[in-house]
Image (spheres, helix red, strand yellow):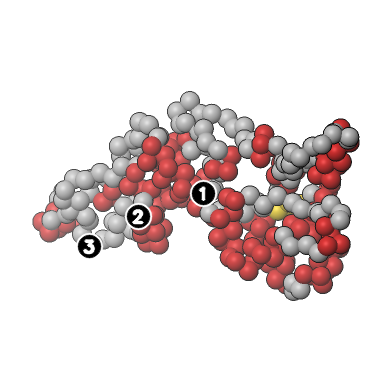
Amino acid sequence: MWQSSKQSEAAVEWFRVYNDILDDYKFRRLGASKSFRFLQLLAYVNKNFRDKSSVPVAELQHFCNISGTRMRQLLQIIDECADMNIVEQRGDSIFITNWNKRQYKTDVVADRVAKYRKKHQGCNVTETLHVTPPETEQNRADTEEVSTNVDTRQPASKKPPFDPSVVVTLFGDILPQLPQPKKIDGARRKALLARMREHPDPEWWRDYFTLASTNPWYSGGSDRNWFADFDFFLRPKQITKITEAGKRNYDIPGKPRPGETELQRIQRLTGLD
């Protein structure tokens, strides 16, 4: 941040912004303009209501005035953020989710420098005091429950929105006729975590596998007698294809089933099969 000479004489107020916002699906959903307004809102909360990790609804108009944001646009941003569990409204305030975990307090740089100089008063000290937060604070990792079937160890910034074993279980429950994954590691784990960050709701995966279960092509219904596996359903192209197609009725009277010959179709329709 740039600062004037007057500002440099006093401690500069700041808050943490982590580099994982570069590939965070929530920020991608908001878009550049709304993401910028949301960062402005975080700065406003940090400056005026840091200890409360929230902003009173009554103060939103003041934020709009100083940030140049229209109230209608701000309310839309808050609604979208609430849908993604970034914020939540409790009573008459808008709370920033995980604010205290992300914006944990550290010592004040100016106080630390003064203490250092006092300690070495009278000494010819040329060493530069590093004023960045301790490494243990920068690299602290969130603890998470480890599943016995799926390895969930990874950096805090890459933490999945929920346990990956949930997706594996849903796949087995809804599509038990398909080959089941034995391990979730390597390229498979990487692909699964990427899709989970794009679709962080377990119910979305339940609906997705349910849609896939309506298509007999994935369960040996083609003339090749081919069965789709777990990795097949993690491909972005297949996800788009299945979700956009929606639920289809593959048993429409008169419509050939996948891999069905004309004779088989006639036999089925006449009840002779």
Depth-wise, is mark 3 or mark 1 nearer the camera?
1
**Closer to the camera in the image, 229 or 74:** 74
User: Residue at coordinates 44% horizontally, 36% vertically from top-left?
Assistant: 169
**Closer to the camera in the image, 186 or 82:** 186
User: Residue at coordinates 79% horizontally, 37% vertically from top-left?
Assistant: 125
- For disc 3, the neighbor class at 10 Å (few under 14, some 14 to 19, many from 20) is few
Type of amino acid at the residue the image marks with label 1? Arg
**In the image, residue 4 above or below residue 127:** below
Percent position of residue 98, x then y: 70, 45
> Which residue does the numbered mark 1 point to in the structure image?
197
**Closer to the camera in the image, 156 or 25:** 156
Query: Image check: 197 left or right of 92?
Result: left
Percent position of residue 235, x then y: 36, 51
Mark 2 or mark 3: whose residue is earlier in sequence: 2
Mark 3 or mark 1: whose residue is earlier in sequence: 1
Picture quadrant of residue 255: bottom left
Picture quadrant of residue 29: bottom right
> Which residue does the numbered mark 2 point to in the structure image?
238
Percent position of residue 186, x then y: 38, 37
> Which residue does the numbered mark 3 point to in the structure image?
254
Mark 2 or mark 1: whose residue is earlier in sequence: 1
User: Residue at coordinates 35% horizontally, 57% vertically from top-left?
Assistant: 237
Depth-wise, is mark 2 or mark 1 nearer the camera?
1
Q: From mark 3 to mark 1, how far is it between C-alphas?
A: 41 Å
**In the image, residue 34 above or below residue 268:** below
Type of amino acid at the residue the image marks with label 2? Gln
**In the image, residue 183 above or below residue 87:** above
Percent position of residue 181, x then y: 35, 35
- For disc 2, the neighbor class at 10 Å (few under 14, some 14 to 19, many from 20) is few
Type of amino acid at the residue the image marks with label 3? Gly
In the rendered view of the protein, which quadrant contains the N terminus?
Answer: bottom right
Query: Image check: 87 left or right of 263?
Result: right
